[in-house]
Image (cartoon, rainbow, N blue to C red):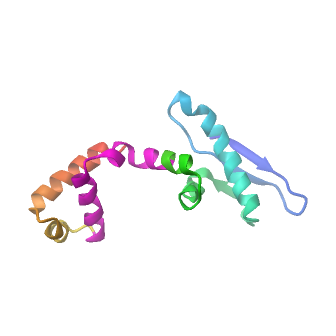
Amino acid sequence: MSYATSCRPSRACGAAAGSTREELEDFRRSHLDPLNVQWMLSRLDSPQQLATHDEVEQVPLATTEVAAADGLVQRVLGALAHAAPAVREAVGIFMAAQYTASLAAEPLYIHPDTLLRRLTRADELLP
């Protein structure tokens, strides 16, 4: 884990922890993550003294940081982000049907076993 600390005159010291990375190319990113957390906490004037990148990494989805949002989607969804539309649709409807295969299969006009095969494929595509 990478750490960045900050001491503000009006507050005690705070710490921000970056996410761990598996690939060598992501080494630099693992050092920038805690700096981004630190910047975000100070910008929001947050009283929180400790935060991890994993806790706040969804913030770019609500901002204009398209590259950061794309990186988050890739890390969380992996190949599922680019799967066949039928597979992605099956996952979304299954979740909306509160994880009940028989209810999710109806609006898709497919047999529940077909839905389960698509969900198995989706699970295989996750990192």
* Residue visible at 76% across and 59% down in the picture: 42
Q: How many labels does the image show?
A: 0
Quadrant including the N terminus: top right
Q: Nearer the viewer, residue 16 or 111?
A: 111
* Residue visible at 70% across and 57% down in the picture: 40
Residue 48 at what x, y percent from top left? 71, 64
Residue 89 at what x, y percent from top left? 26, 59
In the rendered image, the vertical position of residue 24 relative to residue 13, given as above or below: above
Q: Which of 7 and 45 is in front in this view?
A: 45
Q: Nearer the viewer, residue 66 or 72?
A: 66
Left or right, 86 with respect to 95, comes to: left
In the rendered image, the vertical position of residue 49 relative to residue 30, given as above or below: below
Range shown magenta: 72-98
Please tell me whether residue 86 belongs to the stretch shown in magenta.
yes
* Residue visible at 50% across and 31% down in the picture: 23
Left or right, 12 with respect to 95, comes to: right
Please tell me whether residue 119 belongs to the stretch shown in magenta.
no
Q: Is the magenta stretch mostly helix, strand or loop?
A: helix
* Residue visible at 37% across and 42% down in the picture: 127
Residue 103 at what x, y percent from top left? 18, 71
